[in-house]
Amino acid sequence: MGAAEVTAFLTHLATQRQVSASTQNLAKSALLFFYKQVLVVDLPWLDEIVQAKRGNDCRWC
């Protein structure tokens, strides 16, 4: 997968699947690890990804 596919996947998680921010960050971290450690490729363009919205962390608010 190239930049377009990784960006599309992570954006899809946030917009279509509406996953939590922590779930999207976990997927992003896994992809970063795979690309940097296994494929030895840097992914500087990951800063342009649409971030999932953070929910209200307070259960009593």
Image: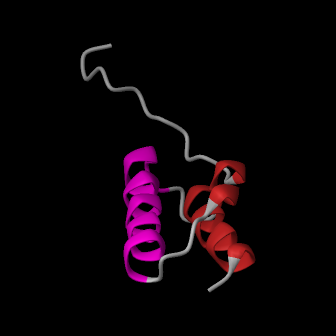
> In this orientation, which residue lies closer to the viewer: 6 or 61?
6
Residue 11 drawn above or below residue 5: above
Quarter of the N terminus within the rendering: bottom right
Asked whether 32 falls inside the magenta stretch, the response is: yes
| Left or right of residue 33, residue 39 in this image | right
Q: Quadrant of residue 29?
A: bottom left
> In this orientation, which residue lies closer to the viewer: 34 or 14?
34
Residue 37 drawn above or below residue 25: below
> In this orientation, which residue lies closer to the viewer: 27 or 41?
41
Q: Main secondary structure of the magenta part?
A: helix
Asked whether 26 falls inside the magenta stretch, the response is: yes
Residue occupying the far top of the picture: 61
Quarter of the C terminus within the rendering: top left
| Left or right of residue 15, residue 4 in this image | right
Part of the protein shown in magenta: 19-38
> In this orientation, which residue lies closer to the viewer: 56 or 24?
24
Q: Residue at x 55, y 39 (%)?
A: 53
The mark total stands at: 0
Residue occupying the far bottom of the picture: 1
Q: How is the image coloured?
A: secondary structure
| Left or right of residue 8, residue 39 in this image | left
Residue occupying the far left of the picture: 60
Q: Residue at x 29, y 20 (%)?
A: 58
Q: Residue at x 46, y 65 (%)?
A: 32
Q: Residue at x 70, y 58 (%)?
A: 45
